[in-house]
Amino acid sequence: MTLELDPASASPPPQVRPWAVDDLPALDPDPFLDEVLRDEPITRISLPYGSGHAWLVTRYEDVRFVTSDPRFSREEVVGRSVTSMTPQAVASQTAGLQYIDPPRHTRLRRVVARAFTGKGMARLRPPAERTAHRMLDGMEQAGPPGDLMEHLHTPFPIAVVCFFLGTDEDDWHEWAGNSEALLAKAPDGSERHQAARRTTRGRVVDLLERRRAEPRDDLAGVLAHAAQAGEITDEEAISLAMAVYVSGGHAVRNNSGSMMYALLTHPEQLDRLRSTPELLPKAVEELYRFVPHRNGVGIPRIATEDVEIGGHLIRRGEAVYNAYVAANRDPSVFPEPDVLDFDRDGAGHLAFGHGSHFCLAALMARMEAEVMIKAVLDRFPGVRLAVPADEVEFQREGLIRGPRTLPVTW
């Protein structure tokens, strides 16, 4: 519960805790986050890059409060040196929706949201299902063992985000390489990165032009119509399309791979899905809560005035990070958080964030997870890991956690 506080009665600020954000094995929760959630749920941290320190909020209700209170600004982060996990911003500060506040954020989000609808996902699901099965055809033909990351979890999300943009069903291959280049760790100014950006921008511009002449309900059609109507500028339409394209594959790749690893290492839950397929949507929600989808924290917010949270006074101008992964393990909200429980009821997880920056693509990500899991279980009822669980290699030094390879047999 967050109450008004006399600044004179505020608790002294906690000591600053250094947080290295080391790589962790498989799906192990971060012991640092577990510790502060238990002992000091509102604390201060210093991260490997940037300068100074920031507040860290870990409890479920406190995270919901900060992410929905307009006194905490994403826009104010731009141009500031804030203690950070990376030497560069987690996402581009000049494109998309990540670093802007209402009312501009509301205007742009309202436009993009017209494509992220139940009707839009219903249109997307059939080509997504066909594509998943085509990808698994290749794995089946090659014979066991097969790598699910190579055959499904890596290419599938890129294909789906291309369908969502408005490409033809067989054209996603031409876009796939640029997505990987734009997400590589090479600096933004590298020749490879700049070439991929130029190529992607050209394809997006061409797609928007086609949708002006041939309107459709895909994202390119929505953005082209909004630009023609004067709701957004042409440059905003291009930036929004590129932001969805770049981010639409990477997170789903890793999250869905982690979900499949969780199922393969919880055979009793996997058996339930085999025998009770109608449980899949609820299982996907619990998997989103259970899987630690990222390392550390994402984009901070800046307090635009003094705000009290849980007895601590956060001063105007101070940075605040929200730990969604910790909030999803808050035992006051999710009893026995280490248990993968498909019968769990109560509060919803925060894997997609909360408030005005709640992930627009949540409906699509849920649909993709359902399609991938169902396709694997339909095609390979006896699927199981081909190596011991502790030999599955996971990503290193990345922001989003997930398997590098996922070898299975059937």
Image (tube, grey):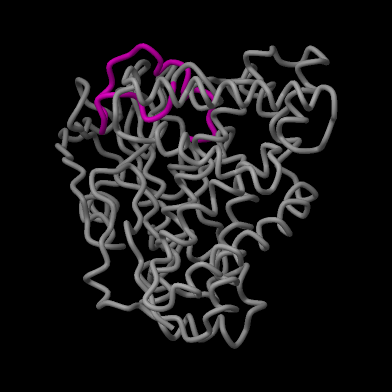
Residue 63's x, y, as percent?
44, 42
Query: In the depicted view, which residue is nearer to us: 272 or 4?
Result: 272
First to last magenta residue range: 67-92
Question: Was residue 79 drawn as part of the magenta stretch in this picture?
Answer: yes
Q: Residue at position x 69%, y 31% from top?
A: 112
- Count of numbered badges drawn on the protein: 0
Q: Residue at position x 28%, y 59% from top?
A: 29
Vertical arrangement, residue 136 with respect to residue 305, above or below: below
Vertical arrangement, residue 248 with respect to residue 240, above or below: below
Name the quadrant of the C terminus: bottom left
Q: Residue at position x 78%, y 51% from top?
A: 123
Examine the residues drawn in magenta and state their main secondary structure: loop
Residue 356's x, y, as percent?
59, 33
Vertical arrangement, residue 90 with respect to residue 235, above or below: below
Q: Residue at position x 38%, y 66% from top?
A: 147
Query: In the depicted view, which residue is nearer to us: 10 or 335?
Result: 335
Question: Was residue 363 drawn as part of the magenta stretch in this picture?
Answer: no
- In this picture, residue 408 sits left or right of residue 72: left
Residue 408's x, y, as percent?
38, 75
Q: Is residue 370 visible?
A: no
Question: Would you identify the image quadrant in which residue 219 lies?
Answer: top right
Q: Is residue 220 visible?
A: yes
